Image (cartoon, coloured by chain):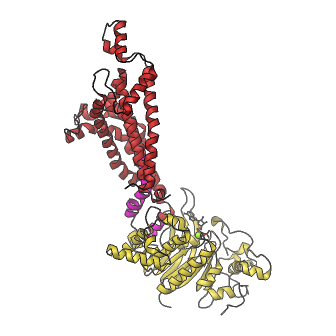
Amino acid sequence: MSAPILDVQDLSIGFSGRRGQPALPIVRDVTFRIGRGERVGLVGESGCGKSVTGLSLMRLLPGTARIGGRITLDGVDMARASRNEVRRMRGKKIAMIFQEPMSALDPVFTVGEQIAEALRLHETLPRAEERARVIEALAEVGIPAPAKRHDEYPHQLSGGMRQRVMIAMALINRPDLIIADEPTTALDVTIQAQIMELLTRLSEETGTALLFITHDLGVVAETCQRMITMYAGEIVEDAPVDAALVSPLHPYTSGLLRSLPHFNKEKGRFAYIPGRVPAPLAMPEGCRFAPRCPHAVEVCGRPQELRFAGAERRVRCIRADELSLDGAVAEVPA
Amino acid sequence: MLNPLQKRMLRRRIVQAVPVLLLATFSVFMLLKLLPGDVAITLAGENATTERIEEIRRINGLDRPLLVQYGQWALNAVQGDLSESLLSGEEVTTTLARVFPNTLFIVCYAILLSIVIGVPLGLLAAARSGGLADRLVMVGSSVGVALPNFWIAMILVVALALNRQIFPATGFVSPWQDLSGAIWYATLPAVALAASGVAEVSRQLRSSLVEVLGSQHFRTLHAKGLPFRSILWRHGLKNVSVNLLTVISLLVNRTLAATVVVEVVFAVPGMGNTIVNATLQRDFPVVQGAVLVMVLTVITVNLITDMLYSVLDPRISQR
Ligand SMILES: Nc1ncnc2c1ncn2[C@@H]1O[C@H](COP(=O)(O)OP(=O)(O)OP(=O)(O)O)[C@@H](O)[C@H]1O
Ligand code: SF4
Ligand SMILES: [Mg+2]
C-alpha cells in the first residue's frame, strides 16, 4: 500500500470539565490509517465517539476538548499544527459533510456564494470563471438547473438538495479525504440511497478517500472497502468489509451484525446486544465490552490491546482466535 | 424598487398610522387640559381681571367644549395647518421646522456614536467570549444601561464643560449654518445620549453573535477553512443584522424620547425644550404639533425598519 493519506496514532480525546471536576475521557487508543481513495466505514453504537473522532481529524472540536496522539494528514500533524496550518488543510486536504443539511448551511448567503467562498480560499479566479466553476460543481452533484440554484438561498432547497450542496462544497477543492458524518440520517429513505450512491461515485471518480460515519452497516457493506468498529471510545475491530460481514472477530461486531433487520428475518427472532455502555468514568479496567459479552471469561478482565489478526485485520479481543462468531451473511455474494 | 410585498406593507402602514396619530395627539390634548391653569392667564398678564381672562379665552376659542377644540385642531392639521402658538403667534410649522432638525441632528449623532463604538465592542466581546475583554465590555455596558442619561449629561457638563471647558456647556448651532460648529455643540448631548446606546448595541450584538457563532452552520464555515476574521465580520454580522436592526430601531425611538431631558440640561433649542416650555405655558397647539412630529418620526423609523428586514434576511422577503 502506498503512503496512507491519513495516519492516526494513539488518538485520545477528552473534555475538560468545570473547575475541580475531572476531565471526561471519551476516546482512547485510536489508531488507524486510510489509504488514498479508500472508503472506510466507521460504525458503533450511539455515543461511542464516532463524531468526536471525525471532528478531531479536522480539529473542529470545541475548546474544552483535549486531544492526545498524532493525526497525520498528508504529512501534517493536525493535532499539533498551528491554527493557520490547520486552516489551510481544511477544505483543501480534508473536508466534512455533516448530518443535518438543514442547519449546516448559512441561511443568509446564497448556496453559490457559500461554495465560491470555499473555492476562493485556495484559488483566485476571475468572477465569471469562478461562477462557472461553482455551477459546474452543482451540476456534478446532480442538482437540476444549477445556474438558477446558484443564486438561491438554502431555505429554497429541499433537504436532499442541501446535502448535495454540502457535497459540492466539500468536493470543490478536490480534497484527499472527506469525512461524512451520518450524511443521510436526516433525509427521506428514497433520498438516502441517492446521496450514498453519489458520494460513492464521486469518491471513485475523483480519487477522494471517504471516512463514512454511520449506524447503517448495510450501507457500509455496499459502499466501503473497510469497516472500523468502535465500542465505548475504542476501536474494537478493523477489517475489510467482506471479511467483517462473513466472519467478524470481535463479539461486539458480531452482535451489531446479528441485530441487522434482514438477519433477524432469516432467524425469525429479534437479536440485540443486552446491557448498556458503561459511563466514561466507570469503564472496566479490562475489556470494555466484558459486562455485555456472552463469551467473557476471567482473562477478559485484563486490559485488551488492538492486535493484528492477519495482515489486514485488527481486533481487540483476547479470545478472537478461539471463537467462531456469526456474521451477517454466510458468504459474500460475488 | 419596492417589491409587491413591501408596497402592500407600506400602504397598510400608512392606513394604520392615522388612528395612532389621532390617539396620540388626543391623549396629549386631554392630559394638557387636565392640568390646572391655561394660556389665557399667562396672556392676560399679572393683575388681569377675571373678565379680561374670559375674553382672551373666548378670542382664542378656549371656551368651547374640549372635543370641539380638538376636532378643530385635527381638521386643520390634516390639511397641513398646525395653527399658531397662542403665546408668540408664530406658525407652529415654522417653530417645528426650526427646532426639529436640531433634535434630529443630536439623535443621529448619538445613534452614529452608539453604532460606531457599540458594534466593534460587541464583536470584540463575542470573539473573546468568556475572556477578559468580554467581561470588561459586559460590565461597562451594564453601567451604561443603568445610568440615567440626564445624570451622565450633568456629569459631562461639570467635567468637560465647566471644569475643563473643552466643550461648550450649553447652547446650539444649527447644522444648516455651521456644520462643524453644530458637531462641536452637539457632542456632549450626543455622548450623554449615546452612553446607553453603546451599552445596548454592544450587549445585544454580543449575545446574538455568541449564539450564532456556536451554531451548526458556523461549524461548516470553520470546516471550509475560512479565517475567523471573515467568519466573524462577514458571516457573523450578516447573520445577526436583523437583531442589530431591531436594537438600533428601538434605540432611535428611545433616544428620541430621551432627548427631551438632555436638551433641557444643555439648553438645546430642540423639540425637547419646545415641548417642555409649551407644556409649562399650556401652549397647546405647539405641544400638539411637536407630539405629532415625534409620533410621525417613530412611525417612519418603524416602517423603514420593517422594510429593511426583508432586505437583510432572504427568508423574510420570500415568505
Ligand atoms: N463538547 C463535548 N463536551 C463534552 N462531552 C462531549 C462533547 N461532545 C461529545 N461529547 C461526548 O462524547 C461522547 C461521544 O459523542 P459522539 O458524538 O462522538 O458519539 P457518536 O458515536 O457520534 O454517537 P451518535 O451515533 O449518536 O452520533 C458522548 O458521550 C458525548 O456526550
Ligand atoms: S475480550 Fe473477552 S469480554 Fe472482551 S470481547 Fe473478547 S471475549 Fe468478550
Ligand atoms: Mg455522531
Q: Quadrant of residue B50?
A: top left
> Can you name the residue that lies furthest to the right here?
A268
Write the start and end of the magenta stretch as one range: B218-247
Kindly identify the residue that appears in the image at 65 percent across and 69 percent down: A283
The x and y percentages for residue A91 are 43, 74
The x and y percentages for residue B57 are 37, 14
Does the segment drawn in magenta span residue A320?
A: no
Front-most of residues A231 and B80: B80
The chain whose colour is red is B
Kindly identify the residue that appears in the image at 40 percent across and 40 percent down: B298
The x and y percentages for residue B280 are 36, 21
Asked if residue B207 is positioned above or below residue A176 in the image, the reply reads: above
| Residue A55 shown left or right of residue B198 in the figure | right
Query: Which quarter is ligand 3 in?
Result: bottom right
Does the segment drawn in magenta span residue B224?
A: yes
Q: Quadrant of the C terminus of chain A?
A: bottom right
| Residue B311 shown left or right of residue A243 in the figure | left
> Can you name the residue that lies furthest to the bottom here?
A334
Front-most of residues B29 and B244: B29
Task: Judge whether residue B185 can be spotted in this image.
Answer: yes
Front-most of residues A166 and B144: A166
Front-most of residues A275 and A164: A164
The chain whose colour is yellow is A
